[in-house]
């Protein structure tokens, strides 16, 4: 994996002076989750007023040692003013009461002074309501306007800061803690400018130090790279791991399984009897399925061979479709389970020379959206994770100019790490994240590609 030498230079003493003088971008080193960390927010958490913010204040002491409020009194919080000198590490602004256009000015009034006092790698979450759930057209319009604000604010953040919008359905307030534990922490370091809808969900995490305890997870394409990072992160969070990969990767797969105390399954997911073989190897069934296995065979469409087309569609799309349906039909996917499909931002925005790949990844997004309603009855969530430019051995072999362009074409001005994708998958695998289903979570640093 190639190191990002530009970030190293831009964050050196001489580099900071030169980059500032010339006006070049200066991406910050992102803060990421470290083993042994106890709280999601290490620093000050600032809350606005509002009914959802009040709900957050009830569990905020479990997330941080330093809680402030700005704009009104919030139970358990200290009043905040910029003159106090406290740098803010996390911000929650409750926009759910904004129902008329003239109230949108509260966004500027709150954030303008706060932005000058954010700590490096600060995380901002705006809470709103789902626009199409509101009967008043003006209220729905106003809540939709908040999406434009949140995406633009994310592009104005500095020093590795991020912004997300959580649209909270009625009766979904109980899911706020799980979402904020992720989006206000370094686990979401490479996610910004995203809009996620939270629905009601009965399942809850019992132990935040091991949120996946008691759950069994399958990760395909697990021998190396992003798949291995996902397996390690799920195991860290308490899951029992089943690692699957092709026979060519057997040695790496078995070594990783041994290290994580998991089960190795050597299997070609495109084999005609792959589903039958898999179900036989997991007699107790699964709680989490992560379809990470994927390949690329790049050519412009004019030069695309049938073999290049078929192999990519078979591995990336057909196999996840077949295996997921087989697990559902056989009862091997437990109630309140999670299915995560590894898509790509290129499946949203397209990419030259990758018609086969982007077709397959867009199909995975469609699969998540199509299956979500029927799986909801059993409390099963299904979502797509869409990585952007991630620093892997594959991107390390890209031509220099393309690699640099990929790194810089995001609001955070850098590529992500396999850990960033793994943290997103781990969050979507938690019991309470059944409140998120049929959605796409982009791990791309708010890439300029796509929406």
Image (cartoon, rainbow, N blue to C red):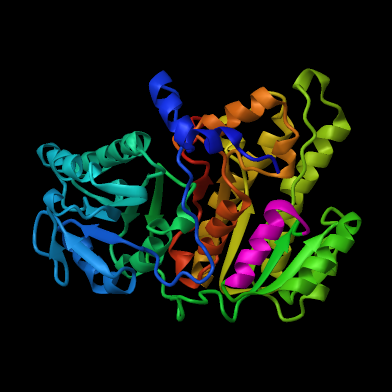
State the extent of the magenta-drawn residues as a range: 223-236
The reply, left or right, for residue 270 in relation to residue 331 is: right
Q: Is residue 433 visible?
A: yes
Q: Nearer the viewer, residue 127 or 168?
A: 127
Q: Tell me the quarter of the picture where residue 223 sits.
A: bottom right
Q: Which residue is found at the position 84% from the left and 61% from the top? A: 252
Q: Tell me the quarter of the picture where residue 192 sits.
A: top left
Q: Position of residue 68 (x, y in %)?
A: 19, 62
Quick check: 357 above or below 58?
Answer: above
- Whether 231 is among the magenta residues is yes
- Whether 277 is among the magenta residues is no
Q: Which residue is found at the position 46% from the left and 69% from the top? A: 37
Q: Which residue is found at the position 74% from the left and 40% from the top? A: 394
Quick check: 307 above or below 81?
Answer: above
Q: Nearer the viewer, residue 324 or 9?
A: 9
Quick check: 31 above or below 53?
Answer: above
Q: Quadrant of the N terminus?
A: top right
The reply, left or right, for residue 213 in relation to residue 129 is: right
Q: Is residue 267 visible?
A: no
Quick check: 179 above or below 297?
Answer: below
Q: Position of residue 9 (x, y in %)?
A: 53, 34
The reply, left or right, for residue 450 in relation to residue 200 is: right
Magenta stretch, main secondary structure, is: helix
Q: Position of residue 79 (x, y in %)?
A: 11, 61
The reply, left or right, for residue 451 in relation to residue 101 is: right
Q: Position of residue 295 (x, y in %)?
A: 77, 43
């Amino acid at each position: 994996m190639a190191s990002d030498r530009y970030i190293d230079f831009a964050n050196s003493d001489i580099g900071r002076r030169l980059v500032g003088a010339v006006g070049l971008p200066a991406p910050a080193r992102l803060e990421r989750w470290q083993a042994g960390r106890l709280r999601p927010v290490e620093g000050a958490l600032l809350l606005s007023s509002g009914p959802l913010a009040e709900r957050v204040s009830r569990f905020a002491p479990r997330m941080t040692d330093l809680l402030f409020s700005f704009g009104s009194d919030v139970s358990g919080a200290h009043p905040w003013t910029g003159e106090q000198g406290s740098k803010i590490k996390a911000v929650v602004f409750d926009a759910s009461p904004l129902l008329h256009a003239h109230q949108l000015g509260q966004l500027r009034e709150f954030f303008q002074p706060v932005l000058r006092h954010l700590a490096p790698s600060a995380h901002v979450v705006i809470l709103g309501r789902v626009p199409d759930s509101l009967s008043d057209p003006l209220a729905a319009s106003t809540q939709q306007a908040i999406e434009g604000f949140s995406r633009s604010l994310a592009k104005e953040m500095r020093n590795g800061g991020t912004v997300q919008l959580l649209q909270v359905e009625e009766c979904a307030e109980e899911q706020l803690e799980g979402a904020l534990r992720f989006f206000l922490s370094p686990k979401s370091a490479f996610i910004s400018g995203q809009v996620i809808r939270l629905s009601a969900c009965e399942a809850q995490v019992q132990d935040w130090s091991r949120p996946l305890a008691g759950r069994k997870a399958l990760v395909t394409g697990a021998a190396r790279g992003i798949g291995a990072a996902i397996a390690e992160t799920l195991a860290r969070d308490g899951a029992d791991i089943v690692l699957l990969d092709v026979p060519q990767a057997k040695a790496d797969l078995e070594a990783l399984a041994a290290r994580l105390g998991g089960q190795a399954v050597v299997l070609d997911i495109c084999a005609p009897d792959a589903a039958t073989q898999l179900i036989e190897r997991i007699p107790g069934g699964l709680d989490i399925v992560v379809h990470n296995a994927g390949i690329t065979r790049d050519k412009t469409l004019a030069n695309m061979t049938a073999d290049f087309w078929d192999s990519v569609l078979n591995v990336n799309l057909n196999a996840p479709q077949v295996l997921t349906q087989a697990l559902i039909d056989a009862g091997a996917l437990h109630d309140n389970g999670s299915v995560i499909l590894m898509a790509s931002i290129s499946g949203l925005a397209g990419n030259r020379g990758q018609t086969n790949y982007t077709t397959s990844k867009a199909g995975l997004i469609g699969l998540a959206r199509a299956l979500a309603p029927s799986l909801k009855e059993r409390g099963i969530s299904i979502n797509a994770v869409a990585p952007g430019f991630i620093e892997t051995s594959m991107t390390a072999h890209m031509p220099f100019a393309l690699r640099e362009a990929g790194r810089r074409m995001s609001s955070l001005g850098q590529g992500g790490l396999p850990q960033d994708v793994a943290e997103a998958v781990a969050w979507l695998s938690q019991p309470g994240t059944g409140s998120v289903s049929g959605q796409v979570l982009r791990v791309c640093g708010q890439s300029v590609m796509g929406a």
